């Protein structure tokens, strides 16, 4: 299954990313931030991916969560490309019958089996770069 996002530059260090059905997120590294930075967006993707899995696993195990949040923190390298070297994902939950052990099992299943973002971060991804010239009114053929 292929997923597509279109990212359009809005000026400064601000971009809008849009999926195939029109949902948008603002990625912003400009001085007056209107959105999150790209590395924050990556952390958010991991946190929401694992949160989705944990909620579903707990529900299937008949111990649904009544409160749940994920706090995520990434430590970045000092040298470029300043990738994350460590990411800590903290699951904070409560609910009737929810134990630390059951939450730990759900989080483990997410990180090791179900979460596609976590799997992508742990794998060797082939990134292909394709360059195209954007058509401008001056260069468009008639």
Image (tube, rainbow, N blue to C red):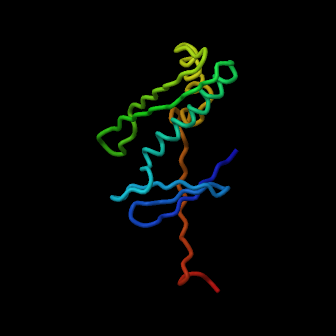
* Position of residue 37 in the picture relative to residue 115 (left or right): left
Q: Nearer the viewer, residue 5 or 79?
A: 5
Q: Quadrant of the N terminus?
A: top right
Q: Nearer the viewer, residue 96 or 2?
A: 96
138 up-or-down from 130: above or below: below
Q: Residue 95 occupies which quadrant of the picture?
A: top right
63 up-or-down from 33: above or below: above
* Position of residue 80 in the picture relative to residue 119 (left or right): left
Q: Residue 114 occupies which quadrant of the picture?
A: top right
Residue shown at the point (49%, 31%) measured from the top left: 70
How far across and down, in percent of the image, does residue 49 sit? 57, 36
Residue shown at the point (54%, 71%) measured from the top left: 134
34 up-or-down from 135: above or below: above
Query: Extreme bottom residue here?
Result: 142
Q: Quadrant of the C terminus?
A: bottom right
How far across and down, in percent of the image, does residue 103 sit? 55, 19
How far across and down, in percent of the image, does residue 74 sit? 39, 35
How far across and down, in percent of the image, does residue 110 sit? 59, 26
Residue shown at the point (42%, 56%) measured from the top left: 28
């Amino acid at each position: 299954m292929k997923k597509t996002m279109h990212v359009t530059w809005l000026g400064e260090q601000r971009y809008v990313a849009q999926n195939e059905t029109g949902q948008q997120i603002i990625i912003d590294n400009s001085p007056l931030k209107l959105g999150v930075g790209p590395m924050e967006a990556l952390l958010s993707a991991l946190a929401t991916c694992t949160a989705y899995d944990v909620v579903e696993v707990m529900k299937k195990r008949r111990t649904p969560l009544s409160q749940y949040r994920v706090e995520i923190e990434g430590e970045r390298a000092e040298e470029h490309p300043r990738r994350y070297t460590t990411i800590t994902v903290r699951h904070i939950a409560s609910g009737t019958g929810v134990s630390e052990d059951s939450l730990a099992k759900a989080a483990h299943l997410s990180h090791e089996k179900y979460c596609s973002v976590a799997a992508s971060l742990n794998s060797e991804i082939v990134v292909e770069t394709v360059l195209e010239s954007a058509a401008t009114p001056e260069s468009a053929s008639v």
